[in-house]
Amino acid sequence: MPNYWLLKTEPRSYSIDDLERDGHTTWEGVRNYQARNFIRDDMKVGDGVLFYHSSAKPPGVAGLARISRAAYPDPTARDSKSHYYDAKASDEDPRWFMVEIEFVDKFPELIPLSTIRDAPGLEEMLLNKKSRLSVQPVAKAEFELVKGMGM
DNA sequence: GCCAACGTTGGC
DNA sequence: GCCAACGTTGGC
């Protein structure tokens, strides 16, 4: 039974087009404990991902991806030159984890956040409730609904 | 650029 | 353990 997720990214930093070009990518730099726990404890290879563009015009779901590598310690936490450096991370306690994802599909048109907000069946999406969380679990029915809206 | 929501830090 | 101060996220 796969799980489903929504991952946020600012397309100016890394967009669905970048992922399509690269085929797959690392997802480092998550520095929120709730998001970390989802990554570390619950993400499995093969899980479905809604690829979300935040701080975009408009913000919304741009396509689909898939978890291609399960959680492992995020090395940028140990790199003092990294923007994501965390002095409290250590070999014994890596503190932060990351996964890798692979490209699945780019939607012909991005599904705007406003559309998702208004869509019947998506009222309970965390996107509408805990809007700041950058890694969110998505119900299978929600995933399928959004996928259907995009393709 | 503003600002509401909310997570984190640190003094007590 | 509380909570004020502070920093960040992200929509608008």
Image: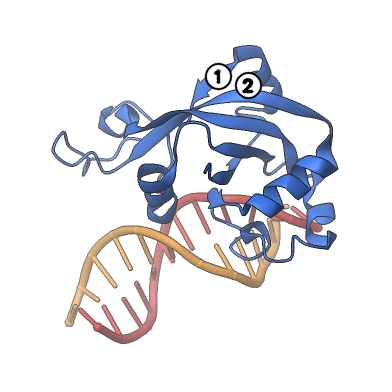
Chain colours: A blue, B orange, C red
Report the side of C8 relative to A50 (left or right).
Answer: left
Decide: few, some or many residues near mark 2? Use Cα within 10 Å; few <14, some 14-19, many ≥20: many
Q: Give coordinates of residue B10: x percent, y percent.
A: 23, 65
Q: Nearer the viewer, residue B9 or A93?
A: A93
**Residue flagged by tag 1: what amino acid is it?**
His
* Horizontal relation, residue A48 to residue A67: left or right: right
* Residue A79 sits above or below residue A123 on the image: above
Q: How crowded is mark 1: few (under 14 residues within 10 Å), some or many (20 or more)?
A: some
Q: Please give the name of the residue rendered at 21% of the width and 44% of the height, measured from the top-left corner.
A: A88
> Residue at image x 67%, y 41%?
A52
Camera-nearest residue between A146 and A95: A146
Q: Is mark 1 on a helix, strand or loop?
A: strand
Count of labels shown?
Answer: 2
What amino acid does circle 2 point to? Leu
**Of all residues shown, which one is farthest toward the front?**
A1
Tell me which chain the residue with mark 2 is part of: A
Residue A92 occupies quadrant = top left
Residue A146 against residue A14 in the figure, above or below: below
Is residue A57 shown to the viewer in this render?
A: no
Q: Residue at x 32, y 35 (%)?
A: A85
Q: Name the residue under label 2.
A: A19
Marks 2 and 1 close (CB-CB < 8 Å): yes
- Rendering quarter of residue A114: bottom right
Circle 2 SS class: helix
- Residue A7 location (% of width, % of height): 58, 41
Q: Residue A24 carries which label?
A: 1
Q: Point out residue A78 in the picture as x, y percentages from the top left corner.
A: 25, 31
Which residue is more in the foreground, A13 or A48? A48
At x 44%, y 37%, the residue is A44
